[in-house]
């Protein structure tokens, strides 16, 4: 799998709205359903080794911040015809196995991934309470095999800034991982 980096949307843009099926609960879930004092939109998938590597830290981070009013949502936009391991029934199993406590949505049309200009998994976006983009990019500097353990430092710093009403530093680093599997 080719290493792909984030496209880095312009800071300050409004969060694109969505309404997608949650593979765990079976309910349709929208941006307003998950929005909080800060809102984290994560593009994930089941099979990407980069996502698998950071899953435990994602779960720790969600557990640390959900009680502080931060909303979280995971979205998978991969082409399930060519990547059946990312199908909704498998997403539900993965969410349970990984310990996701946030909605894990399926973007069948890939319109949401296009609206967010998502390029890779994992990819992270932080919006403030007004749903303006304050951070986009990586969880932290860890990658499988680089010797840096996942800590969530970059995403945690962004969330702390938003929750404290401070500006998130504009120097941000792209995430990197597997490319989104676009339909042909």
Image (tube, rainbow, N blue to C red):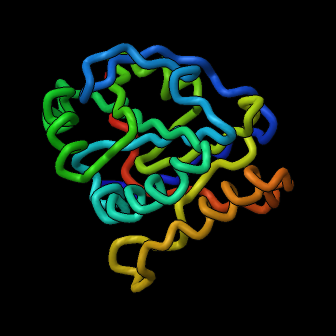
Up/down of 2 relative to 126, above or below: below
Residue found at x 48% / y 42%? 42
* Image quadrant in which you'd find residue 32: top right
Count of numbered badges drawn on the protein: 0
Instruction: Specify the farthest residue to the front.
Output: 67
Residue 78, x across and y down, in percent: 31, 32
Residues 90 and 181: in front is 90
Residues 73 and 64: in front is 64
Residue found at x 24% / y 29%? 24
Residues 25 and 171: in front is 25
* Image quadrant in which you'd find residue 17: top right
Residue 51, x across and y down, in percent: 34, 55
Up/down of 34 relative to 47, above or below: above
* Image quadrant in which you'd find residue 110: top left
Residue 172, x across and y down, in percent: 71, 60
Residue found at x 21% / y 27%? 88
Residue 155, x across and y down, in percent: 60, 59
Residue found at x 81% / y 36%? 12
Quadrant of the image containing the N terminus: bottom left
Quadrant of the image containing the C terminus: top left
């Amino acid at each position: 799998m080719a290493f792909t980096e984030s496209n880095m949307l312009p800071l300050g843009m409004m969060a694109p709205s969505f309404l997608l099926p949650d593979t765990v609960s079976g309910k349709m879930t929208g941006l307003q359903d998950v929005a909080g004092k800060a809102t984290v939109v994560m593009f994930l998938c089941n099979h990407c080794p980069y996502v698998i590597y950071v899953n435990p830290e994602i779960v720790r981070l969600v557990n640390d911040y959900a009680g502080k009013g931060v909303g979280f949502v995971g979205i998978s936009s991969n082409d399930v015809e060519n990547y059946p391991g990312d199908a909704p029934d498998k997403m539900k199993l993965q969410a349970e196995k990984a310990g996701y406590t946030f909605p894990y949505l399926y973007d069948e049309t890939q319109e949401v991934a296009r609206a967010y200009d998502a390029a890779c998994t994992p990819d992270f976006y932080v919006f403030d309470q007004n749903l303006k983009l304050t951070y986009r990019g990586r969880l932290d500097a860890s990658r499988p095999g680089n010797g840096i353990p996942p800590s969530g430092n970059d995403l945690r710093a962004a969330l702390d800034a938003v929750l404290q009403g401070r500006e998130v530093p504009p120097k941000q680093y792209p995430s990197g991982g597997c490319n989104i599997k676009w339909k042909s």
